[in-house]
Image (cartoon, grey):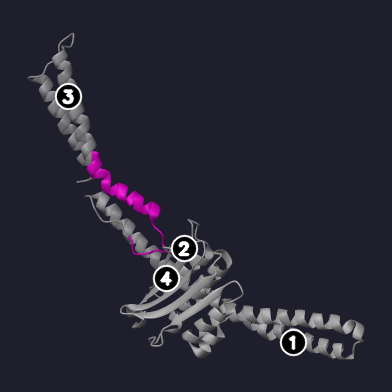
Amino acid sequence: MSLFWRIFLLNAVVLIAATTLLLGPVTVSTPVLLTEAAVLTAGLAAMLIANGVLLRVGLAPLQRLTRAMTTTDLLRPGTRPAVGGHGEVAELITTFNTMLDRLEAERATSAVRALSAQEAERHRIAQELHDEIGQTLTAVLLELKSVADHAPSAVREELHQVQETTRASLDEIRRIARRLRPGVLEELGLASALKALTSEFTGPTLAVRHHVDADLPPLSRDTELVLYRVAQEGLTNAARHSGARRVDLTLKRTPTGMELSVRDDGHGIQGAAEGAGISGMRERALLIGADLTLSPRPDSGTEVRLVVPLHHESH
């Protein structure tokens, strides 16, 4: 029975009962007696209570659906409101769950395309930085060296400073190209790539330590790339925004899969809104069926944890 008819019939029953009582044992005098007023007040209260109970019970599934609609996040899939109620209420919740399934599938498909295009663009930019700008700066360094060798001693020191500036720029371009295209990941594997990544972020004010299990299972190229990019983004956030002095990167094998964690001793999340970097990590995690969580540490700092189930690698 639909919600409309249930409410209508209850109101009809209550009104018919009230009319029957008024026509039968309950009468109203003029002027109204105190006992009659009490009976009418009690009857009105009973009608209101009955309607309130029915509406509360009948609309409770809709309230749960409303909460689900306001809290649903496609980057955290799998949560569905329980199908409750009867008639069109249950049908509405079922339709909403079906819509979520379709939206999550479409988002996953579009995310695969977008991230694939992003990786291809990163590869192209890294190639151009290395082949064009890198070679140009290398040629400039050789020219500066030649000029400095034949220059008067008065300007030779200035030319050496220009050489050092150019060499520093060349090193920075190569570092950017390595971050855009992790060649070490393709050539030496995930463990070596993560160790090289921690070395890049280690500096005078930040100590990055790595703990990578030696018995890692064979992983697909997509899984290795997601693990690397999440580690890279986690280290970037720790270095730029957390004010941390120490970061621990751990990749270990668990009974149910793989677990990557990036823990820092910074000032923590402190209720900050998730930016594009964290959203990107969540989208990458969805590509391989992994679970990404960001949580404050008990003492101080933040922990980024990525759990990859083993069953994903078997497909």
Q: What stretch is highlighted in magenta?
A: 55-79
Q: Which of marks 4 and 1 is in front?
A: 4
Q: Residue furthest left?
A: 25
Mark 2 or mark 1: which is in front?
Answer: 2
56 vs 289, left or right, is left
Question: Label 3 to label 2, Cα distance in Å?
Answer: 60 Å
| Disc 3 versus disc 4: nearer the observer | 4
Question: Label 1: which residue?
Answer: 138
Instruction: Tell me what residue is drawn at x 17 percent, y 21 percent.
Output: 40
Q: Mark 3 points at which residue?
A: 42
Is residue 241 visible in the rendered image? The answer is yes
Q: Which mark is residue 305?
A: 4
Residue found at x 26% / y 50%: 88
Separation of disc 4 and disc 1 at Cα?
41 Å
Task: Tell me the quadrant of the picture where the C terminus can be found.
Answer: bottom left
Q: Which residue type carries mark 1?
A: Thr
- Distance of label 2 from label 1 (alpha carbons): 45 Å
Label 2 sits on a secondary structure element that is: loop
